[in-house]
Amino acid sequence: MRGLGLLTVMASIACGFGAGQIGLTLLGQRAERPEPVQITAALAAVENASEAPLPEDWPTVFDPYVPDPPKAAAMTKKLETYRLVGLVAGGENGWAILTASDGDRLIRSGDRLIGGETVLEIASDGVWIERETERVLVAFEETPDEMMARIMSNGSVQADEAEIPASTFAGSDMHRILGRAGSVRMVSANGATGEIFPEILWVREGQVYDLIGLRRGDLVLRVNGYSVSDPETLANAGQILSESDEFAVEIMRGGQRRTISVRITGRG
């Protein structure tokens, strides 16, 4: 037993010695503390270091910048110009002829013109149109010769007989013939209610009204005995005129009735 105890003591001493040696070895292998870094010196070294040269040709990443071209100034829309050739003012049944860039055109209330305007009314003073929410009047523009002829005719005595060439009525409908002749409006005689008649407002020299001998202020009562109280009846006068070589126009001028006998010439 005593020998066993001795062995145990010796083993314990050996283990303790071995553990101590291991501890000393580990302590001996601990890394030494690094020297402190000098920050100022490190920054100076970075500033003084030479930069690496940049490559001369960088790869293309984006397309080259091209500035947008300047915007063109908005073009102002040119307004269409209209010239009033003639009209028959008669409310909803009235009509007129306007000349524009597309030529002569027969128009009525509600029609849309080439410039985008809407015809509002055919009145005795001209054609009222709507242009960009505004009411615009297209009135007659007399030439100096036409104005002089009108002034002279208003002061002269008209003959009760007249001649008119058949070619005046050829190649066109009566709407256009009468429209080019001047302008009329539908009124009641002496301001009374009832039957209405065309009143001559304006006469163009060399056209139908002028050749017949009509002048401003005349009321046309009958053509060959037929009433012309409606604008469409007046426009259909071509059929009346084709029936004979002569026709009569009954008018009221200055409160007096007069009859103009018109002879159609030049018929084969």
Image: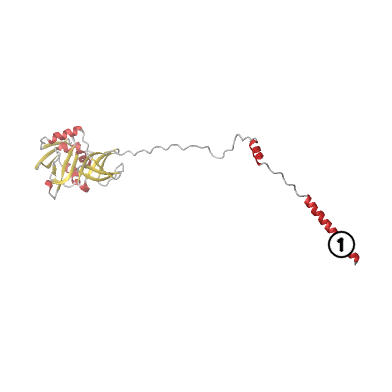
User: Against 208, is 193 above or below?
Assistant: below
**Range covered by the magenta-colored residues:** 6-11
State the residue in front, 36 or 15.
36
The quarter holding residue 204 reads top left
Q: Is residue 223 visible?
A: no
State the residue in front, 63 or 92.
63
- Residue 24, image x, y percentages: 80, 52
Give the residue drawn at x 17%, y 40%.
201
Q: Is residue 103 left or right of residue 219?
A: right
- Residue 240, image x, y percentages: 16, 43
Tell me the quadrant of the picture where the N terminus can be found. bottom right
- Residue 216, image x, y percentages: 15, 39
Dominant secondary structure of the residues highlighted in magenta in the image: helix
Q: Residue furthest bottom?
A: 1
Q: Is residue 148 left or right of residue 45?
A: left
Q: Is residue 6 left or right of residue 27?
A: right
The quarter holding residue 105 reads top left
Q: Is residue 54 magenta?
A: no
Tell me the quadrant of the picture where the C terminus can be found. top left
Q: Is residue 47 left or right of residue 211?
A: right
Total labels: the figure holds 1
Q: Amino acid at mark 1?
A: Val
What is the crowding at mark 1: few (fewer than 14 residues within 10 Å), some, or many (at least 20)? few
- Disc 1 target residue: 9
State the residue in front, 1 or 123.
1
- Residue 183, image x, y percentages: 19, 41
